[in-house]
Image (cartoon, helix red, strand yellow):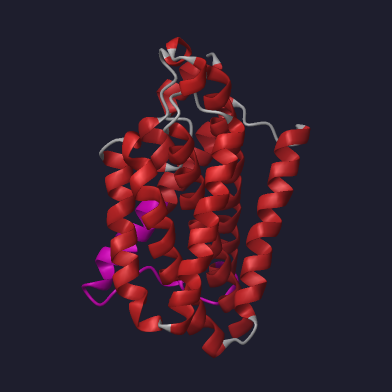
Amino acid sequence: MSKHSALNTFGRSGNPAFSRNFNLAGAGAIAREDRMTLDGAVNKTVILLSLCFAGAFIGWNTPALTMPALIVGAILSFVTIFRSPTKAGSTAPFYAAFQGVALGGITVFAEAQYPGIGIQAIGLTFGILASLLFCYKTGIIKPTENFRLMIFSATMGIGLLYLVSFVMSFFGSGIGFIHSNGLFGIGFSLFVVGIAALNLVLDFDFIEEGADQGLPKHMEWYGAFSLMVTLVWLYIEILRLLMKLRSR
């Protein structure tokens, strides 16, 4: 199976943003000045990260905004993914800002219990980002077709498990090990952090492939948005893992 056929078959990533909208068919027919570039995607990722940090400052100082920001951020992500990637230039900045507010509030809650945990989670998140980018660029980690399928399957499995646990919580039950600070619960969190981190490798590959194949210019925003989705997930999972470890 070729790389492009694997793209169409498996959606290329566990990240739903890429899974739904990264289609390279006919991309090469676009005029050069209207094509996605790697530099453009990187610049837009920096913009979104800056907005996320600005939002986090607001959330840190006004934690009451956490839940509303989470809801608005979720709505914006669904609108961006399921409507059209052409809207990402308008929705992605708002998504990053609102998610930043939510993350700031969540971090305040964690800091109140375990001082210093926020900076640890941020450092680990960006340390993992830098390490995996290095591994990807040097070829230490190669996103083969089997690798993509494995990460896609694991990501969907984790999402389904979280969904089942969420539904069960309405009936006074749940899947205990997800939140447990025992060895099994910590092992589960380590596994989830690993899968979230490896999604970054796929995201790098998808953005680079999109630039090489000449996707439309608006996909720079969409690629940056999709990378943000993975980074937000990774940060939350790292924070959960650290809270479990600190609670022992």
Q: Nearer the viewer, residue 69 or 147?
A: 69
Q: Of residues 1 and 114, which is closer to you in this image?
A: 114
| Highlighted magenta segment, given as a residue range | 159-184
- State which quadrant residue 134 falls in: top right
Above or below: residue 161 compared with residue 212: below
Considering every residue shown, the one lying at the far left of the view is 171
Residue lying farthest to the front in this orientation: 33
Magenta: predominant secondary structure element? helix
Q: Quadrant of the C terminus?
A: bottom right
Left or right: 111, with 109 as reference point: right
Q: Nearer the viewer, residue 127 or 169?
A: 127
Residue 156, horizontal then vertical, whole percent? 41, 45
> How far across and how far down the image is residue 182, in percent?
56, 76
Residue 248 seen in the figure: no
- Does residue 42 sit above or below 127 in this rendering? above
Q: Is residue 60 visible?
A: yes
The residue shown at (37%, 42%) is 88
